Amino acid sequence: MELLFRAATNDDRLPVIALVRACLDEFQLPYDETRYDVDLVDIARGYDSIGGVLLIVEDACQNLVGTVGIVPVSGGGFYLRKMYVGPGHRGRGVGRQLLTRALGEARSRGATFVTLNTMTAMTAARALYESFGFRETGPVEASPRVEHLYRLEMQILTPAINE
């Protein structure tokens, strides 16, 4: 399957929101543009203007396949967010490619570490993060969308995109 990776713009807002909502619905998680998903209201403001990027991947027909974003956090790190692959595209290495590209973006922006959070039910995503060297940290603040916190020190080598 031919894939095109690129930075999202505000023109991508509606398909990105549709994909994120579909993935959240699958795990019975809330979509909330006032808190957890405010970054999607204005992608340029939620990512670009603060030194981050929301990457998207499309198939040859320009259908949205997946997303991943990074934003800077204090201490020289980046926070990985909105890592979603549409249900029909999972198990094909798309998530691995998205994560590789997101970590490359973070590294190119000087990241010393990357953090993320996820849910217990997202077992495939958690296994992917751990395969890249992310280690679970804690404790977790009570939230309807956070059960596990992970951190990757950037000196740890990550798998190559074609592994």
Image (tube, rainbow, N blue to C red):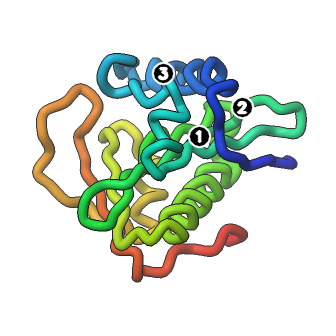
**Crowd class of label 3 (few under 14; some 14 to 19; many from 20; radius 10 Å):** some
Q: Which residue type carries mark 3?
A: Val
Residue 83 position in % (x across, y down): 50, 43
Mark 1 to mark 2 CA distance (whole Å): 8 Å
Q: Can you say which quadrant of the picture contains the C terminus?
A: bottom right
Note whether 146 is above or below 136 in the view shown.
Answer: above
Please tell me which residue is depicted at 48% across the width and 42% down the height of the picture. 49
Disc 1 vs disc 2: Cβ atoms closer than 8 Å? yes
Secondary structure state at the residue bearing disc 3: loop
Q: Residue at x 43, y 46 (%)?
A: 50
* Viewer-proximal residue among 101 and 28: 101
Q: What is the number of callouts on the image?
A: 3
- Where is residue 149 drawn, in percent x and y? 25, 51
Residue identified by numbered label 3:
41
> Nearer the observer, disc 3 or disc 1?
3
At 46% from the left and 67% from the top, the residue drawn is 131
> Disc 3 and disc 1: Cα gap in Å?
15 Å
* Disc marking residue 67: 1
* Residue 135 place in picture, x, y as percent: 29, 65
Determine the CA span between mark 2 and mark 3.
Answer: 18 Å
Find disc 2 in the rendering and name its residue.
64
Q: Nearer the viewer, residue 101 or 53?
A: 53
Q: Is residue 67 above or below residue 10?
A: below
Residue in the image at 19% along x and 30% along y:
143
Give the mark nearer the N terminus: 3 vs 1: 3
Q: What label sits on residue 123 in the rendered view?
A: none
